[in-house]
Image: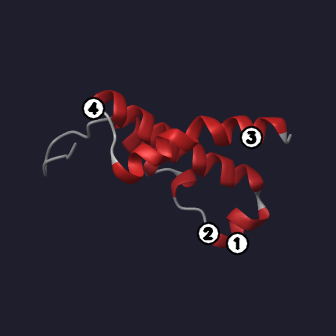
Amino acid sequence: CTQQAGQQPVAPDIAARWSGPDANPSAVALIREPARQEALLELVFDTERKLDSVCGPASGDDALVLRLAPTIKETTATHD
């Protein structure tokens, strides 16, 4: 789903998170801080989940991200 210029975001809560510190970490921060990696992944996954529920079923790369989301979350939980 797309947002027209001047309209409110489809998912304002997600849009606000993309404006926050977790959305644009540097490569160095991602390498040095696993928590930043997880925060960015979670933001991506939450975005795809939200848009899937608001805009309809994902396709292409978005569908792949949705399929990976629970797998990666389960994998990181078992490695802690």
| Three-letter amino acid code of the residue under disc 2 | Ser
x 39%, y 32%: residue: 50
x 26%, y 40%: residue: 9
* Chain-order first, disc 4 or disc 1: 1
Mark 2 vs mark 3: in front: 3
Mark 4 vs mark 2: in front: 4
x 40%, y 48%: residue: 62
Residue 51, position as x, y percentages in the image:
34, 36
Alpha-carbon distance for marks 4 and 1?
36 Å
Residue 69, position as x, y percentages in the image:
57, 40
* Chain-order first, disc 1 or disc 3: 1
Please name the residue that numbered disc 2 is placed on: 26
Secondary structure, mark 2, is loop
Q: In the drawing, does residue 36 fall left or right of residue 18?
A: right
Secondary structure, mark 4, is loop
| Three-letter amino acid code of the residue under disc 4 | Gly
- Marker disc for residue 75: 3
* Chain-order first, disc 4 or disc 2: 2
